[in-house]
Amino acid sequence: MLQGPLCYTPMASFDLVVVGAGIVGLAHALAGARRGLRVAVVERDSRAASASVRNFGFVTVSGQEGGDTRRRALRSREVWIEVAREAAIDVHQRGAIVVARRVAALRVLEEFAESAMGEGCELLTAARARELVPNLCGAALGALSSPHELRVEAREALPRLARWLELRHGVTFLWDCPVLSVEGSTVRHSGGEIRTDAVVIAPGAGIAAFHPGLARAVNLRHCKLQMMRLAAPGFRLPGVLMTDLSLLRYGGFAAMPGALHLRRELEAECAHELENGVHLIVAQGADGSLVVGDSHHYADAPDPFSSSAVDVLILGELRALLDLRIEVTERWLGYYPTADVAPVLAESLAPRTRLVSVTSGTGMSTAFAIGEETLAGLF
């Protein structure tokens, strides 16, 4: 990837400049390239290192809130399939299984399967769930199997996506180039200036660096997630796993009539988990290792500290779902922006300058569709 020389060219010219090389920025770069535009991506770091590479790489459809979010997830899934094939991005898992451990959770899954959003999904009996999911604990009462989900290794997928955009679509990348200002058709960065017809700023949680007033107006906060990688358990999962607490975190499930009863039951049984925003996702890599999380803590400024007590809560949910030996090999923190404007903050800062930040933790699932929408409004 280009690094350095163009960063110090006195003046370059493009049809579109994208600020930020996370998944939201790359999605806008792809949408621009597919329109035949000359695109440059300007990134302050040497690689994407924030929210986009710290997540599960889980492209989620079932359970997403109905309406625009689900529509965007379906479209983004289509683009992910195309891009993964062309950019040699490995799809490590396809589909998801949501396991019900409580009668109220099973009812929510039944209601979801009967709704329009349950199209393509299948309800599984407890016996069938145990056939499909190795080492599933005896408390499982049934499950919902969804064919729609994809799972990539985010820390591998984003660099490959950027490289493919550069080689296949001629997108220019300026790494290690913090943007200093965007004024009309001029983007000033640490090494010079770029002239452009349009700008998309995809700053993730860094909205205040470009528009402090906007960050205050939307009550910008940071959501911190605790994540872990576990040694390979010796078996393969048929898809990404979730369970009861996830039904309250995902708007599509939470909108079901039975979710209110489930919430009351979980509030009585899982007060600490709910207080820490814990729900369980279990994904698996090509090497068999498990990526497990997560929790949700909100603050005005990013908190760099993890809690062993929260890890215990997450692993407690895992033990209640799967019978396996737990060996944690890696721990890390993820972050994403959250605001009073959700699921997407899309603000026009000037006639052809847009600031776009996914404020709901659904960037991997919806960014490609959001990029297409933004570019349709700019060109």
Image (cartoon, rainbow, N blue to C red):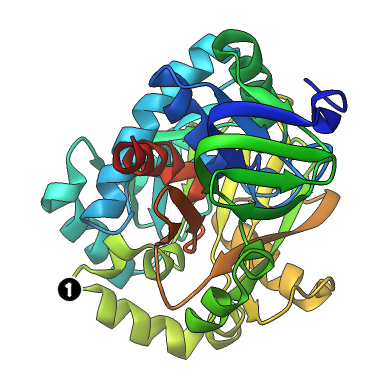
> Horizontal and vertical percent for residue 246?
44, 63
> Horizontal and vertical percent for residue 333?
76, 60
Residues 135 and 19: in front is 19
* Picture quadrant where residue 259 is located: bottom left
Residue 222 as seen in the image, left or right of residue 231: left
Q: Which residue is mark 1?
A: 257
User: Which quadrant, please, contains the N terminus?
Assistant: top right
Residues 258 and 68: in front is 68
For image coordinates 37% across by 65% down, the residue present is: 247
Q: Secondary structure at mark 1?
A: loop
User: Which quadrant, please, contains the C terminus?
Assistant: top left
For image coordinates 62% across by 44% down, the residue present is: 186
Residues 176 and 103: in front is 176
Is residue 198 something that shows in the picture? yes
Amino acid under disc 1: Pro
For image coordinates 79% across by 21% down, the residue present is: 2
Residues 338 and 122: in front is 338
Is residue 145 something that shows in the picture? no
Residue 140 as seen in the image, left or right of residue 253: right
Q: From the viewer's perspective, is residue 28 above or below residue 5?
A: below
Q: How many marks?
A: 1
* Picture quadrant where residue 168 is located: top right
Local packing at callout 1 (Cα closer than 10 Å; few below 14, some 14-19, many 20+) is: few
> Horizontal and vertical percent for residue 298?
62, 79
> Horizontal and vertical percent for residue 351?
39, 53
For image coordinates 58% across by 71% down, the residue present is: 278
